[in-house]
Amino acid sequence: MSALAAELVDPDHEPEHEPDHEPGHEPGSARDDAPVHRPQSLLLGFLGAVVLYDELPPLPSVVLLDLLADLGVTEAAARATLKRMTQRGLLHRGQVGRSAEYGLTPLAERVLRQADERVSSPAPFTHPSGEWTLLSYSVPESRRDLRHKVRSRLTWAGFGGLRDGLWIAPGTVDVAAVLAPDDLSEAVELADAFAARPLPGTDVDRLVRRAWDVAALRRAHLRFVADWSAPPRVRGSLAQRTLLAADWLALLRADPGLPAGQLGSDHPAAASAALYERVATALQPAARAALRRALP
Protein backbone atom coordinates (compact mmCIF):
# COMPACT_ATOMS: atom_id res chain seq x y z
CA MET A 1 0.00 0.00 0.00
CA SER A 2 1.12 3.51 -0.64
CA ALA A 3 2.19 5.77 2.16
CA LEU A 4 -1.13 7.62 1.99
CA ALA A 5 -3.15 4.45 2.38
CA ALA A 6 -0.99 3.36 5.29
CA GLU A 7 -1.83 6.59 7.07
CA LEU A 8 -5.54 6.26 6.37
CA VAL A 9 -5.73 2.80 7.93
CA ASP A 10 -3.31 3.62 10.74
CA PRO A 11 -4.65 1.82 13.81
CA ASP A 12 -2.88 4.29 16.10
CA HIS A 13 -4.95 7.16 14.73
CA GLU A 14 -7.92 7.91 16.95
CA PRO A 15 -11.09 7.09 14.98
CA GLU A 16 -14.06 9.38 15.05
CA HIS A 17 -16.49 6.45 15.25
CA GLU A 18 -16.13 2.80 16.20
CA PRO A 19 -18.46 -0.14 15.62
CA ASP A 20 -20.54 -1.10 18.66
CA HIS A 21 -18.52 -4.33 18.84
CA GLU A 22 -16.05 -6.26 16.79
CA PRO A 23 -17.34 -7.36 13.38
CA GLY A 24 -18.41 -10.97 13.35
CA HIS A 25 -19.08 -11.85 16.98
CA GLU A 26 -20.47 -10.60 20.24
CA PRO A 27 -18.21 -9.44 23.09
CA GLY A 28 -17.25 -12.29 25.37
CA SER A 29 -17.07 -14.90 22.63
CA ALA A 30 -14.10 -17.22 22.20
CA ARG A 31 -12.74 -15.05 19.40
CA ASP A 32 -12.43 -11.75 21.26
CA ASP A 33 -8.73 -11.56 20.37
CA ALA A 34 -9.45 -11.14 16.64
CA PRO A 35 -8.52 -7.69 15.28
CA VAL A 36 -11.02 -4.85 15.50
CA HIS A 37 -11.21 -2.78 12.32
CA ARG A 38 -12.30 0.80 11.85
CA PRO A 39 -15.15 1.19 9.32
CA GLN A 40 -12.75 3.01 6.98
CA SER A 41 -10.33 0.06 7.05
CA LEU A 42 -13.19 -2.28 6.17
CA LEU A 43 -14.26 -0.09 3.25
CA LEU A 44 -10.70 0.20 1.94
CA GLY A 45 -10.39 -3.58 2.13
CA PHE A 46 -13.68 -4.01 0.26
CA LEU A 47 -12.81 -1.46 -2.41
CA GLY A 48 -9.39 -2.96 -3.03
CA ALA A 49 -10.55 -6.57 -3.04
CA VAL A 50 -13.87 -6.43 -4.87
CA VAL A 51 -14.35 -3.08 -6.62
CA LEU A 52 -10.96 -1.92 -7.93
CA TYR A 53 -10.53 -4.15 -10.97
CA ASP A 54 -14.21 -4.54 -11.92
CA GLU A 55 -15.95 -2.19 -14.33
CA LEU A 56 -18.72 -1.16 -11.94
CA PRO A 57 -20.98 1.88 -11.82
CA PRO A 58 -20.97 4.06 -8.68
CA LEU A 59 -22.27 2.10 -5.71
CA PRO A 60 -25.55 3.16 -4.05
CA SER A 61 -25.04 4.15 -0.44
CA VAL A 62 -27.45 1.42 0.69
CA VAL A 63 -25.08 -1.24 -0.67
CA LEU A 64 -22.19 0.13 1.40
CA LEU A 65 -24.35 0.66 4.48
CA ASP A 66 -25.71 -2.90 4.28
CA LEU A 67 -22.20 -4.32 3.90
CA LEU A 68 -20.91 -2.44 6.95
CA ALA A 69 -24.00 -3.45 8.91
CA ASP A 70 -23.21 -7.09 8.15
CA LEU A 71 -19.78 -6.40 9.65
CA GLY A 72 -21.16 -4.95 12.88
CA VAL A 73 -20.89 -1.23 12.05
CA THR A 74 -23.74 1.06 13.07
CA GLU A 75 -25.47 3.14 10.42
CA ALA A 76 -24.32 6.38 12.05
CA ALA A 77 -20.67 5.27 12.01
CA ALA A 78 -20.99 4.03 8.41
CA ARG A 79 -22.48 7.32 7.18
CA ALA A 80 -19.82 9.32 9.01
CA THR A 81 -17.12 7.17 7.39
CA LEU A 82 -18.51 7.72 3.89
CA LYS A 83 -18.59 11.46 4.53
CA ARG A 84 -15.01 11.48 5.87
CA MET A 85 -13.67 9.43 2.94
CA THR A 86 -15.39 11.81 0.51
CA GLN A 87 -13.83 14.80 2.25
CA ARG A 88 -10.40 13.16 2.01
CA GLY A 89 -10.75 12.66 -1.72
CA LEU A 90 -11.02 8.86 -1.66
CA LEU A 91 -14.66 8.70 -2.79
CA HIS A 92 -16.71 10.93 -5.03
CA ARG A 93 -20.37 11.32 -4.13
CA GLY A 94 -23.19 11.59 -6.64
CA GLN A 95 -26.93 11.90 -6.28
CA VAL A 96 -29.61 9.92 -8.12
CA GLY A 97 -33.01 11.15 -7.05
CA ARG A 98 -33.02 10.95 -3.27
CA SER A 99 -30.25 8.34 -3.13
CA ALA A 100 -26.52 8.94 -2.83
CA GLU A 101 -23.96 6.88 -4.70
CA TYR A 102 -20.20 6.59 -4.34
CA GLY A 103 -17.33 5.81 -6.68
CA LEU A 104 -13.55 5.64 -6.47
CA THR A 105 -11.59 8.80 -7.16
CA PRO A 106 -8.34 8.71 -9.18
CA LEU A 107 -6.48 9.15 -5.88
CA ALA A 108 -8.20 6.12 -4.38
CA GLU A 109 -7.51 4.02 -7.46
CA ARG A 110 -3.82 4.94 -7.33
CA VAL A 111 -3.61 4.17 -3.61
CA LEU A 112 -5.34 0.81 -3.95
CA ARG A 113 -3.34 -0.27 -7.00
CA GLN A 114 -0.12 0.49 -5.16
CA ALA A 115 -1.41 -1.47 -2.19
CA ASP A 116 -2.18 -4.45 -4.37
CA GLU A 117 1.50 -4.89 -5.20
CA ARG A 118 2.03 -6.21 -1.69
CA VAL A 119 -1.46 -7.51 -0.95
CA SER A 120 -1.28 -9.90 -3.91
CA SER A 121 2.39 -10.82 -3.56
CA PRO A 122 2.89 -14.60 -3.14
CA ALA A 123 5.68 -13.90 -0.62
CA PRO A 124 4.90 -10.57 1.09
CA PHE A 125 6.95 -11.42 4.18
CA THR A 126 10.15 -12.47 2.42
CA HIS A 127 13.32 -10.37 2.20
CA PRO A 128 16.94 -11.35 1.46
CA SER A 129 18.84 -12.38 4.55
CA GLY A 130 21.63 -10.04 5.59
CA GLU A 131 20.33 -6.95 3.73
CA TRP A 132 18.95 -4.01 5.70
CA THR A 133 18.03 -0.37 5.19
CA LEU A 134 18.88 2.18 7.85
CA LEU A 135 17.09 5.53 7.91
CA SER A 136 17.76 8.54 10.08
CA TYR A 137 15.41 11.50 10.22
CA SER A 138 14.61 14.37 12.53
CA VAL A 139 11.25 16.17 12.49
CA PRO A 140 10.86 19.30 14.63
CA GLU A 141 8.68 18.91 17.70
CA SER A 142 6.45 21.66 16.32
CA ARG A 143 5.56 19.45 13.33
CA ARG A 144 3.79 16.59 15.07
CA ASP A 145 1.43 16.22 12.11
CA LEU A 146 4.37 15.57 9.80
CA ARG A 147 5.97 13.23 12.35
CA HIS A 148 2.81 11.12 12.49
CA LYS A 149 2.67 10.84 8.69
CA VAL A 150 6.33 9.85 8.46
CA ARG A 151 6.04 7.22 11.20
CA SER A 152 2.90 5.72 9.66
CA ARG A 153 4.41 5.49 6.20
CA LEU A 154 7.68 4.06 7.44
CA THR A 155 5.77 1.40 9.36
CA TRP A 156 3.92 0.26 6.22
CA ALA A 157 7.24 0.22 4.32
CA GLY A 158 8.61 -2.28 6.86
CA PHE A 159 10.60 -0.02 9.19
CA GLY A 160 10.89 -0.49 12.93
CA GLY A 161 12.30 2.07 15.33
CA LEU A 162 15.68 1.36 16.91
CA ARG A 163 15.85 4.64 18.84
CA ASP A 164 14.68 8.21 18.37
CA GLY A 165 15.11 9.14 14.72
CA LEU A 166 16.81 5.87 13.69
CA TRP A 167 14.81 3.20 11.85
CA ILE A 168 15.67 -0.16 10.30
CA ALA A 169 13.93 -2.29 7.67
CA PRO A 170 14.71 -5.70 6.19
CA GLY A 171 15.89 -5.72 2.58
CA THR A 172 16.56 -2.69 0.41
CA VAL A 173 13.75 -0.14 0.63
CA ASP A 174 13.19 2.63 -1.91
CA VAL A 175 12.94 5.36 0.70
CA ALA A 176 12.52 8.08 -1.92
CA ALA A 177 9.34 6.35 -3.11
CA VAL A 178 8.07 5.94 0.46
CA LEU A 179 8.47 9.67 1.09
CA ALA A 180 7.43 10.75 -2.40
CA PRO A 181 3.88 12.10 -1.79
CA ASP A 182 3.61 15.88 -1.92
CA ASP A 183 2.59 16.23 1.72
CA LEU A 184 5.91 14.68 2.75
CA SER A 185 8.18 16.95 0.72
CA GLU A 186 9.59 18.42 3.95
CA ALA A 187 10.47 14.98 5.29
CA VAL A 188 12.56 14.10 2.22
CA GLU A 189 14.99 16.85 3.13
CA LEU A 190 15.13 15.69 6.76
CA ALA A 191 15.89 12.00 6.08
CA ASP A 192 19.04 10.07 5.17
CA ALA A 193 18.95 6.40 4.18
CA PHE A 194 21.67 3.78 3.72
CA ALA A 195 21.81 0.19 2.51
CA ALA A 196 23.49 -1.72 5.33
CA ARG A 197 25.06 -5.06 6.17
CA PRO A 198 25.84 -5.96 9.79
CA LEU A 199 29.51 -5.99 10.73
CA PRO A 200 31.01 -9.12 12.33
CA GLY A 201 30.06 -9.32 15.97
CA THR A 202 26.79 -7.40 15.56
CA ASP A 203 23.95 -9.01 17.49
CA VAL A 204 21.29 -8.83 14.76
CA ASP A 205 18.76 -10.73 16.89
CA ARG A 206 19.02 -8.04 19.56
CA LEU A 207 18.52 -5.28 16.99
CA VAL A 208 15.50 -7.03 15.52
CA ARG A 209 13.87 -7.50 18.91
CA ARG A 210 14.52 -3.89 19.79
CA ALA A 211 12.74 -2.70 16.64
CA TRP A 212 9.90 -5.27 16.55
CA ASP A 213 7.93 -7.38 19.00
CA VAL A 214 8.75 -10.71 17.35
CA ALA A 215 6.54 -12.70 19.72
CA ALA A 216 3.58 -10.44 18.89
CA LEU A 217 4.21 -10.94 15.15
CA ARG A 218 4.08 -14.67 15.65
CA ARG A 219 0.83 -14.40 17.60
CA ALA A 220 -0.69 -12.22 14.87
CA HIS A 221 0.07 -14.84 12.22
CA LEU A 222 -1.24 -17.67 14.37
CA ARG A 223 -4.43 -15.71 15.04
CA PHE A 224 -4.90 -15.07 11.31
CA VAL A 225 -4.42 -18.77 10.54
CA ALA A 226 -6.80 -19.79 13.33
CA ASP A 227 -9.47 -17.27 12.31
CA TRP A 228 -9.49 -18.17 8.64
CA SER A 229 -9.16 -21.91 9.17
CA ALA A 230 -12.31 -21.84 11.35
CA PRO A 231 -15.93 -21.24 10.31
CA PRO A 232 -16.44 -17.66 9.05
CA ARG A 233 -16.96 -14.93 11.65
CA VAL A 234 -19.55 -13.20 9.47
CA ARG A 235 -22.24 -14.33 7.05
CA GLY A 236 -22.19 -13.81 3.31
CA SER A 237 -19.35 -14.03 0.80
CA LEU A 238 -19.12 -10.25 0.36
CA ALA A 239 -18.76 -9.56 4.09
CA GLN A 240 -16.32 -12.47 4.43
CA ARG A 241 -14.15 -11.21 1.56
CA THR A 242 -14.16 -7.71 3.05
CA LEU A 243 -13.18 -8.93 6.51
CA LEU A 244 -10.45 -11.14 5.02
CA ALA A 245 -9.01 -8.13 3.18
CA ALA A 246 -9.04 -6.01 6.34
CA ASP A 247 -7.42 -8.77 8.41
CA TRP A 248 -4.74 -9.25 5.75
CA LEU A 249 -3.96 -5.54 5.53
CA ALA A 250 -3.59 -5.41 9.32
CA LEU A 251 -1.17 -8.35 9.22
CA LEU A 252 0.85 -6.81 6.38
CA ARG A 253 1.14 -3.62 8.36
CA ALA A 254 2.31 -5.45 11.49
CA ASP A 255 4.91 -7.75 9.89
CA PRO A 256 7.69 -6.17 7.78
CA GLY A 257 8.95 -9.54 6.56
CA LEU A 258 11.90 -10.28 8.80
CA PRO A 259 14.55 -12.77 7.62
CA ALA A 260 13.90 -16.36 8.61
CA GLY A 261 17.16 -16.46 10.54
CA GLN A 262 15.71 -14.03 13.07
CA LEU A 263 12.38 -15.87 13.38
CA GLY A 264 13.01 -19.61 13.44
CA SER A 265 12.05 -22.30 10.95
CA ASP A 266 8.55 -22.68 12.38
CA HIS A 267 7.49 -19.04 11.96
CA PRO A 268 3.93 -19.08 10.52
CA ALA A 269 4.29 -16.27 7.93
CA ALA A 270 4.38 -18.68 4.98
CA ALA A 271 1.28 -20.46 6.29
CA SER A 272 -0.54 -17.13 6.57
CA ALA A 273 0.33 -16.17 2.99
CA ALA A 274 -0.76 -19.53 1.60
CA LEU A 275 -4.01 -19.44 3.56
CA TYR A 276 -4.83 -15.91 2.45
CA GLU A 277 -4.32 -16.81 -1.20
CA ARG A 278 -6.45 -19.94 -0.88
CA VAL A 279 -9.35 -18.29 0.96
CA ALA A 280 -9.30 -15.14 -1.19
CA THR A 281 -9.37 -17.22 -4.37
CA ALA A 282 -12.29 -19.26 -3.07
CA LEU A 283 -14.33 -16.22 -1.94
CA GLN A 284 -13.65 -13.86 -4.85
CA PRO A 285 -16.15 -15.14 -7.47
CA ALA A 286 -19.03 -15.34 -5.01
CA ALA A 287 -18.23 -11.92 -3.53
CA ARG A 288 -18.20 -10.26 -6.95
CA ALA A 289 -21.45 -11.98 -7.89
CA ALA A 290 -23.07 -10.89 -4.64
CA LEU A 291 -22.06 -7.28 -5.26
CA ARG A 292 -23.44 -7.29 -8.79
CA ARG A 293 -26.74 -8.74 -7.54
CA ALA A 294 -26.97 -5.91 -5.02
CA LEU A 295 -26.65 -3.22 -7.69
CA PRO A 296 -29.80 -1.79 -9.29
Image: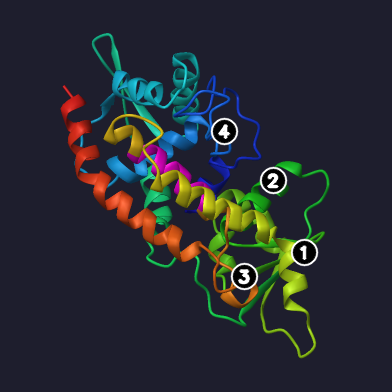
Q: Is residue 199 left or right of residue 295?
A: right
> Real-space Cα distance between discs 2 and 1?
20 Å
Observer-nearest of 249 and 224? 224
Q: Are marks 3 and 1 in contact (CB under 8 Å)?
A: no
As helix, strand or loop, the secondary structure at mark 2 comes to helix
Check residue 210 in the rendering and tell me which mark sits there, or answer none.
Answer: 1
Q: Nearer the viewer, mark 2 or mark 4?
A: 4
Instruction: Report, in whole angstroms, how far the alpha carbon at label 2 lies from the one at label 4.
Output: 29 Å
Residue 148 is marked as 2
Q: Main secondary structure of the magenta part?
A: helix
Residue 60 percent coordinates (x, y): 27, 22
Placement of 29 over or under 62, stated as above or below: below
Nearer to the camera, 243 or 45: 243
Q: Please name whichever residue, 186 or 240, is drawn nearer the observer in this view of the structure.
A: 240
Q: Earlier in the sequence, mark 2 or mark 3?
A: 2
Give SS at disc 3. Answer: loop
Q: Quadrant of the C terminus?
A: top left
3D distance between C-alphas at marks 1 and 4: 28 Å
Q: Position of residue 138 (x, y in %)?
A: 79, 59
Q: Closer to the N terminus: mark 2 or mark 1?
A: 2
Residue 85 to residue 129: above or below: above
Q: Amino acid at mark 1?
A: Arg
Residue bounds of the magenta highlight: 241-251
Closer to the eye: label 2 or 3: 3
Q: What amino acid is found at the position of numbered circle 4 in the picture? A: Asp
For this view, does 82 lie left or right of residue 145? left
Identity, as a three-letter code, of the amino acid under mark 3: Leu
Q: CA distance from mark 3 to mark 1?
A: 14 Å
